[in-house]
Image (tube, helix red, strand yellow):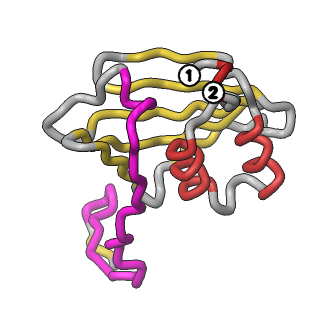
Amino acid sequence: MHASEGRTLRAFRAFELQAIHLMADGALSDEQLTALGEIECATGYEYTGCGYFLQVHLPSLPIARRTLSTPGVVGRAGDVQAGFLVFLGEQALTLECHTWGPVDVPPDFRDRDVSIAALPDTTDHRATPRSVTDPAGSERT
């Protein structure tokens, strides 16, 4: 993108912010999420051959380490399908975008028109009793 186009290139693309918002719901405040969208320059970027890692630092981000993976988030651009993870800690956020289909995430994926969707939660949250054998060999429920 050229400066003459009158647009500012931010650290995160709109689809990346959508993925982060979905996974960080309840983990980051509205203020933190808004601040992520205002960061102009990433502190790290690595293309891996089948995706990428994009890192930013922000003083208001958590120090404690945490991985955010739910809900599952999928990005699609043409025949490319990608999954996402968010890693928090040490006042940094790292977004991982990885291949989630037969076609690897290409180096220009961030420049494509990517649509984001959260996968439905198929987890049965009801407690299901099950038998467990303790080390002494007796069965308990």
Taken as a whole, is the magenta stretch helix, strand or loop? loop
Does residue 24 appear to the left or right of 140 in the view shown?
right
Location of residue 47 in the rendering, given as x and y in whole percent from the top left corner: 41, 17
Instruction: Check disc 2 and give the amino acid type.
Output: Glu
Q: Quadrant of residue 12?
A: top right
**Can you give x and y, in whole percent of width and height, for residue 139 in the image?**
27, 72
Q: Secondary structure at mark 2?
A: helix
Residue nearer the viewer, 27 or 14 = 14
Residue density around tag 2, few if under 14, some if 14–19, many if 20 or more, within 10 Å: few
Which residue is found at the position 31% from the left and 47% from the top? 76
Q: Is residue 12 above or below residue 130?
A: above
Q: Which quarter of the rendered picture does the C terminus lie within?
A: bottom left
* Up-down relation of residue 69 to residue 3 (above or below): below
Q: Amino acid at mark 1?
A: Met
The residues tagged by marks 2 and 1 sit, at their Cα atoms, a distance apart of: 7 Å
Res 138 quadrant in image? bottom left
Judge left or right: residue 101 versus residue 119: left
Q: To which residue does mark 2 refer? A: 5
Where does the image place residue 37, in percent across and percent down from the top left?
71, 42
Give neighbour class at mark 1: few <14, some 14-19, many 20+ (Cα, 10 Å): few
Q: Residue at x 86, y 32 (%)?
A: 59
- The structure residue drawn at horizontal position 72% and vertical position 40%, both measured from the top left corner, is 36
Does the magenta run of residues contain 103?
no
Vertical placement of 125 versus 101: above or below? below
Instruction: Give residue 134's position: percent from left, percent from top.
Output: 33, 62
In the figure, is residue 122 to the left or right of 72? left
Give the magenta-colored segment's residue range: 108-137
Q: Nearer the viewer, mark 2 or mark 1?
A: 2
Q: Which residue is mark 1?
A: 1
Q: At numbered mark 1, what does the secondary structure look like: helix, strand or loop?
A: loop
Q: Badges 2 and 1: C-beta atoms under 8 Å apart?
A: yes
Q: Nearer the viewer, residue 75 or 83?
A: 75
